[in-house]
Amino acid sequence: MAGRILTPLDNDKRIEERLARMKRKLDAQEPLAVCSLFHGGGVLDRAIHAGLARSGIDTFVRIGIEVEDQYLDASLRNNPMLWRDTSFAICADVRDVQRGSGTPECDLVVAGIPCTGASRAGKAKNKLNSAEQHPSAGSLFIDFLDFVRFSNPVVAIVENVPDYQTSTSMEVIRSVLKSLGYRLFECILDGAVFGAFENRSRMALVAYTEGAFEPLRLDQITPLRTKERSLKDLIDAVPETDESWKCYDYLGRKEERDIASGKGFRRQLLTPEATSCGCIGRGYAKARSTEPFIRHPRNPALSRLLTVSEHARVKTIPVEIVEGVSNTTAHEILGQSVIYTAFEAIAAVVGKLITKLHRTATPAGVMAA
């Protein structure tokens, strides 16, 4: 018996399908479905949700995948606007999640691809020559591309460290997304520009289907808030006798050794008059040498870590996102997150462009069939 050759839908058909799906949902004022990869505590997804909501576009997480159960539980509890009864919250390594013809169609894919192998600190710590060499994170861009291919979104939004732009992973991402019919917009979002106290820059990639909206430009992305003048506008009222004030002698000795050996590592000891702070990472609760500490107001030998609330504020993240978890877990969720208002701003522009084109395509007084 002769065999039968099965061929996938061509790109033109896939493009038509995703554009028609989004138009139908916008006409019916239905929420757009999101495939959220590497979900974490939901910071990036909530920022995207808030930005699109500024243009009246509602979204929900149709598929949410996160390997850490404490992070996913926190998001399910603290981000009720993201989840529906029809959502799939999957606690698993994304590489183990089946994808294929049965993958639900989604209108957006949102992914903060882990930067463990792409950041300078990650490369140095793991002695890597490239991001792709990292044993657990190096191949995760492939899973992102798989979910784009099978969920067929109109838009995909990716964030990572700025160095990711020059990685082999990013070269492959660009090539594959273009082959799937997406136009690409890339930029570096500076946290300070977007009203954050923390000096954190992130790469943003917006892959969008031609016909979904007009070309995206950097000058369209404007700040949604003004940065605080000094740290005193952000800090909690921590008593001078609180047990969080500690000596951290070992960090002082490490700094002395680093200076003696010609290394550039220095402690960040902040006063309430500070006008910015450096990056705070996932392991902040470990009290590491180069991350921000607040000086004791009277005793120069004492300092403390930022509280969870303070950490959230310097990143412009709503503090309720990390309610109900331990301090260590809260700092982990926040430390590997984006500057919230920066990605809210980029989503706000995407929302404006989508609604502008949709209104043009659907004349006033004409009801969708």
Image: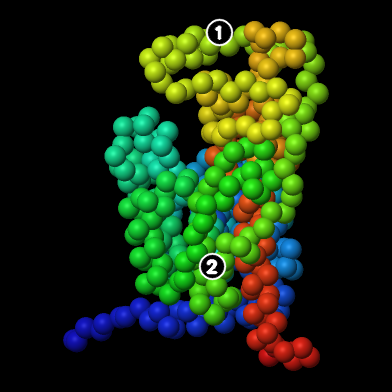
* Nearer-the-camera pick, 102 or 226: 226
Q: Tell me the quadrant of the picture where the C terminus can be found.
A: bottom right
Q: Amino acid at mark 2?
A: Val
Can the viewer see residue 213?
Answer: yes
Can the viewer see residue 98?
Answer: no
Q: Amino acid at mark 1?
A: Asp
- Judging from the image, what secondary structure is the residue with disc 1 in? helix
Q: Is 176 rendered above or below residue 9?
A: above
Q: Is 109 rendered above or below residue 66?
A: below
Q: Which residue is mark 1?
A: 249
Residue drawn at the location 49% of the way across and 14% of the way down: 255
Q: Which residue is mark 2?
A: 155
Camera-side mark, 2 or 1: 1
Residue 351 in the image, given as x and y percentages of width and height: 66, 68
Q: Is 343 rendered above or below residue 130?
A: below
Mark 2 and mark 1 lie on one chain; the one further toward the N terminus is 2
Q: CA distance from mark 2 to mark 1?
A: 50 Å
Residue drawn at the location 44% of the way across and 83% of the way down: 13
Q: Tell me the quadrant of the picture where the N terminus can be found.
A: bottom left
* Nearer-the-camera pick, 360 or 271: 271
Residue drawn at the location 37% of the way across and 29% of the way down: 125
Disc on res. 86 = none
131 relative to 155 in the view: left or right:
left
Q: Residue 107: name its quadrant.
A: bottom right
Q: Within 10 Å of the Cα at label 1, are there few (<14), some (14-19), or many (20+) other Cα atoms?
A: few
Residue 28 in the image, given as x and y percentages of width and height: 71, 79
- Judging from the image, what secondary structure is the residue with disc 2 in? strand
